[in-house]
Image: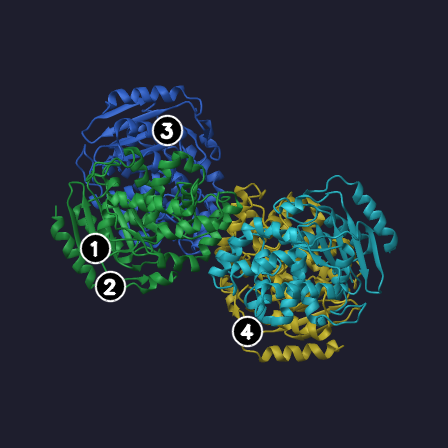
Chain colours: A yellow, B cyan, C blue, D green
Amino acid sequence: MAELEEVLPALAEEMAARTDRGEVADYIPQLRKIDPDRFGIAVALNDGRVITAGDADEAFSIQSISKMFTLTLALGKVGDALWRRVGREPSGNPFNSIVQLEHELGIPRNPFINAGAIVVTDVLLAGHQPREALGEILRFIQFLADDDGIAIDREVAASERATGYRNFALANYMRAFGNLQHEPELALGVYFHHCAIAMSCRQLALSAQFLAHEGRNPATGHSVVSAERARRILALMLTCGHYDGSGDFAFRVGIPGKSGVGGGIIGIVPGVASIAVWSPGLNENGNSRLGSIALEKLTKAMNWSVFAP
Amino acid sequence: MAELEEVLPALAEEMAARTDRGEVADYIPQLRKIDPDRFGIAVALNDGRVITAGDADEAFSIQSISKMFTLTLALGKVGDALWRRVGREPSGNPFNSIVQLEHELGIPRNPFINAGAIVVTDVLLAGHQPREALGEILRFIQFLADDDGIAIDREVAASERATGYRNFALANYMRAFGNLQHEPELALGVYFHHCAIAMSCRQLALSAQFLAHEGRNPATGHSVVSAERARRILALMLTCGHYDGSGDFAFRVGIPGKSGVGGGIIGIVPGVASIAVWSPGLNENGNSRLGSIALEKLTKAMNWSVFAP
Amino acid sequence: MAELEEVLPALAEEMAARTDRGEVADYIPQLRKIDPDRFGIAVALNDGRVITAGDADEAFSIQSISKMFTLTLALGKVGDALWRRVGREPSGNPFNSIVQLEHELGIPRNPFINAGAIVVTDVLLAGHQPREALGEILRFIQFLADDDGIAIDREVAASERATGYRNFALANYMRAFGNLQHEPELALGVYFHHCAIAMSCRQLALSAQFLAHEGRNPATGHSVVSAERARRILALMLTCGHYDGSGDFAFRVGIPGKSGVGGGIIGIVPGVASIAVWSPGLNENGNSRLGSIALEKLTKAMNWSVFAP
Amino acid sequence: MAELEEVLPALAEEMAARTDRGEVADYIPQLRKIDPDRFGIAVALNDGRVITAGDADEAFSIQSISKMFTLTLALGKVGDALWRRVGREPSGNPFNSIVQLEHELGIPRNPFINAGAIVVTDVLLAGHQPREALGEILRFIQFLADDDGIAIDREVAASERATGYRNFALANYMRAFGNLQHEPELALGVYFHHCAIAMSCRQLALSAQFLAHEGRNPATGHSVVSAERARRILALMLTCGHYDGSGDFAFRVGIPGKSGVGGGIIGIVPGVASIAVWSPGLNENGNSRLGSIALEKLTKAMNWSVFAP
């Protein structure tokens, strides 16, 4: 098998040379400003090594990758009761579709599409002020990455709030069906802010490592979730982590992942490593174009796949 | 870890005692006659052992499980060109939905929903008479299971043909979009017959073992598909193998699987084993109710999961 | 032909005796309080007579009937340019469906479903403060009915605003597609208030009489719209005036109409009369149950139909 | 008001000069051969006069206009029981959409979309051989037009049968829901043949005149349907006669009509006349482009509208 220390720099170099980088998300004004030529990758191995290449220490907007953290927190808070308010099935529709909500009476298909993540945020709001709920989410991510420097980019959050009409539509719609316990304004306030958390590939890979290690952080030894819950979160990532491109990602890359429109993707090789990659240009499903390709090449080179023996 | 030789009989006994068995498929008249109390399970381990419990040697109608075999054959025949005519995404709709076909211009979401499997069958028909194409499918399955006794239940096939109006609708619809190269009557003739193949749990577990063993049959050593293709078929099974219950199956059971309305399910533990289970009563998604539960209990007891280290 | 002076009281009496009155709208808290036993009817004939029966002078919430007035105003303001932002086709969906908006990129099907009426309200807001736009709508209706006593029920408006999540969803959704020029909060503020205008059957019949009289008010002689525009508004009422019950209303009643969830319906017999009827209980399409039945009986008794010679 | 004898030739001349004729239907091979430059119009006045212009005596394929005749026949056969199997609402979807059938369990929206007309044909088949049912339809149309020369173009019928996969899909789909009492092959055999009836504008205008004359043929005095039924058929034509362009036709033309993809349209001015127009090029809704425009100009010139006093 190839050596990761050699594979990663070569991959970063290859990606830097590509010109088919996709389009940077343009519906959030602040994200439009990102340099599309950036590419970073970080692999946090369960043996403690962290190997990086490219712009792996530059912070970017994690966007929907935050849904992985909020789901973990909400499951810790209400357990399987969460599944009464959100499903566990792939949506077969774009990340911000409202059609399914009408047919399925306000219950989003899964916690990784926008509607589902708004419900998860609503769960985290229960008994809290928005500021407190947001603080809890941020501290959880800092704890997972063991890094107090992780912060929210408030300009991005403000930009999303000012233009996030579609998310307001989703939230109001679910509220109409009784599947939002707080005013849409409040739930979305928290939602836009946790999507606007900025992290580097290195921080992201470290923060997700508990999922590659049966629920425990291998560096600190802290137990985050049970081994069973870690597996189940991975199952959701595999089937639903890339919107209506989830099947294709599983087919090509072969590991659970979660993407964000900021161009980041987190991938998990159970028992081995967590991988964070970042390239701002997106493909037609709203997932990082070069990030997906880099992960496909990396898992192939390293023979990493949940479908391998 | 538990010993499979002890787990399996206990599981069969527990399942035999349950009364919440779901409903036997009633839209295919011949399937209605099946005794809902049957339960069988067979595990074909990569080390050569085959362990069974319950009615593991009784043949049943494999129905949609045949889609796994036809997909494998069609990929062998046309390779990735197949993906121009059928997608790789979960459908988010019941197995026989026609709505998506209209919105997506006759391209079925994946090869495991009926529309997709009809396209796959159409691919296998190219250059053949229906009788020849069907013979090729049957011989392929006999070869995989190393068992010439596997046969088609022609009464079931006739029963499906006489009542399969919905499949006729799907086939005609795709033909209208130009995504069927043969007359619907011909493609469906083959389709109904390969769905009507009858196999026991033991035969089914053996026939699918190449998917648990990087594409090679561990007993005969014959290479069926490349290791990469085996993984990709498993990815499709995990994301799409249980219709609009695929996400839930991945979440609960944690391994790739493919179900049929005859009550059978095949599950694959990469590197370890293939599992066939059979109980005729179905849940609301059209998957074997006790079969799903038995697989969940078995994978938990054996600590089998593609999401485990 | 029957004499209207005899038909109307008999009809009111018959309706008062019926017990199958449908259900009062319950999603707007203030409307729930209405006495379901009320029934009123008023016919304003082009010859100047106004004949009434039952509770014809009691004010009720006109709700979606206001869409007929705002459409008329908006056509006066921007003319056919309106049709770039809203369609003219029956929706085939409930009044508050959001599905079509996604498939048709934020362009509502017609000005009589909620989404379409919100766009129309947005048009009336252009260049105005909400308070001014609302004042213009109210004064227009007072002018049409020649009655300054018509007013907005601010409790109903506040009740709708506090619970109108679905309308907030629609407005935000259209704003996301760029088909709302003002903030959803502003357009909906005006929308909720014009829906909350309270009028009696007598006032309503008089206010709509211009549509029965080629665009001119027969009492005052004032021209409201051109004859051609009056006919076109009637065409929209016939094809779209009763949500997904429009076809049935045209089939049974045979004249253009517009209903509101407050239980009112306005019907127009071109060249003859405008009819307002009110009974708070609704049928499954959200239209007044007894109101529809009374109109069917009245048009039959009087031989009124746009499809008659 | 203008004199029809002057208006009609001028209109035919104007239409002959236009080059924006739309596209001839290409999905039925036989129809592709039609000369797109043809234009004919015939007006059958209730006073007995028949005024024509252009190619008014050339036979063309009436296609979906036949649905008006089969609906009339089926209502005569089973009365309001028909409405248990087909709705009366505009569909809001193209003429051959299958989506609504899935959501509404096999009950088509109205008798003028393909699915609904196939159900109506199935009703006419009850107790008959296909040949007999077809003969009954043809004789009914001959009787209405008082012209035994009207015939079926069997080449067109064969062409439709050979390529009508979408209609086979619809029929099989409804059969799956139990809303077709005969095998799809049989019902469609009759359906394709009655769509392939060839008539001239003159014949068509005469055959539909009973609808303009309270259900009675003014020439022969024969009563075809009751006055009430005639009005109700007109209501269905107005709300559903032009597929998803019905609202626009009512808005622009202002009279009930029914179009066919052969380029014909029949329009009814209650109490005055029936109008048949023919121009083979279609607009984006599948309705005759110049036919629609000609009808709009004619009704405007003559001040004909069901919404006029």
Tell how many labels.
4
SS for callout 1: loop
The alpha-carbon separation of the residues under discs 2 and 3 comes to 49 Å
Q: Is residue A84 above or below residue A212?
A: above
Q: Disc 1: which chain? A: D
Q: Position of residue B141 (x, y in %)?
A: 71, 63
User: Which circle marks residue A21 in the picture?
Assistant: 4
Q: Is residue D296 visible?
A: no
Three-letter amino acid code at the position of disc 1: Asp
For label 1, the crowd category at 10 Å Cα-Cα, with few meaning under 14, some 14 to 19 and many 20 or more, is: some
Q: Nearer the viewer, mark 1 or mark 3?
A: 1
SS for callout 4: loop
User: Which circle marks residue C293 in the picture?
Assistant: 3
Q: Is residue C45 above or below residue C102?
A: above
Q: Disc 4: which chain? A: A
Q: Nearer the viewer, mark 2 or mark 4?
A: 2
The residue singled out by tag 2 in the image is: D37
